Image (cartoon, helix red, strand yellow):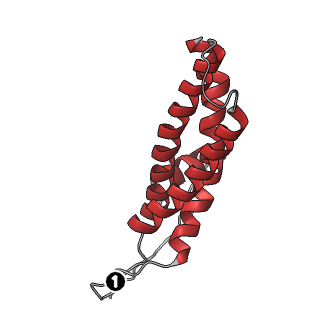
């Protein structure tokens, strides 16, 4: 009778960067969809805000005057609303064995919490990085 000897091999310790890189490469699909939908909405609205900001900087007289703060607040609000809505539409709960897709408020909450940092990040990139390059 042959005896099988098994050895426990401990994996080599990974660095912090290797762990985060692996997590980034293997992100769950609902998270990727939530971030992507919010990023697309934020990019489109950020481009509109950037165009408005540059027009005011160059001296254009627009109806209502200088409403940059209101435009930024509206931008963030719309990113939160549309990021949540689009995520709710494209991220159903897991189906299991059935064929019916179920959407709950949790999908919208996932989109909302993904949209918060993305909305801010896009506005910072537009106002602090792109605007000085374009003016």
Quarter containing the N terminus: bottom left
Expressed as whole percent of the image width and height from the top left, the position of residue 47 reads 51, 31
Expressed as whole percent of the image width and height from the top left, the position of residue 109 reads 58, 68
The answer to whether 19 is drawn above or below residue 123 in the figure is: below
Disc 1: which residue: 2
Please report the residue visible at 62 percent of the width from the left and 52 percent of the height from the top: 77
Please report the residue visible at 65 percent of the width from the left and 26 percent of the height from the top: 127
State the residue in front, 71 or 42: 71
Secondary structure, mark 1, is loop
Please report the residue visible at 64 percent of the width from the left and 38 percent of the height from the top: 71
Side (left or right) of 67 relative to 31 = right
Quarter containing the C terminus: top right
Regarding residue 15, the answer to whether it shows in the image is: no
- Name the residue furthest left: 99
The answer to whether 25 is drawn above or below residue 102 in the figure is: above
Expressed as whole percent of the image width and height from the top left, the position of residue 123 reads 63, 35
State the residue in front, 98 or 84: 84
State the residue in front, 69 or 36: 69
Please report the residue visible at 41 percent of the width from the left and 73 percent of the height from the top: 92
Question: Dot 1: few (<14), some (14–19), or many (≥20) neighbours within 10 Å?
Answer: few
State the residue in front, 65 or 98: 65
Expressed as whole percent of the image width and height from the top left, the position of residue 43 reads 50, 38
């Amino acid at each position: 009778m042959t005896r099988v000897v098994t050895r426990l091999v401990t994996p080599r310790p990974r660095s912090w960067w290797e762990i985060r890189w692996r997590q980034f490469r293997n992100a769950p699909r609902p998270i990727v969809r939530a971030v992507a939908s919010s990023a697309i909405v934020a990019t489109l609205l950020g481009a509109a805000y950037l165009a408005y900001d540059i027009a005011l900087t160059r001296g254009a007289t627009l109806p209502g005057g200088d409403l940059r703060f209101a435009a930024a607040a509206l931008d963030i609000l719309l990113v939160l609303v549309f990021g949540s809505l689009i995520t709710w539409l494209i991220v159903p709960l897991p189906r299991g064995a059935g064929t019916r897709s179920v959407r709950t408020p949790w999908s919208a909450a996932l989109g909302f919490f993904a949209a918060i940092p993305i909305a801010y990040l896009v506005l910072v990139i537009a106002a602090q990085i792109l605007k000085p390059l374009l003016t």
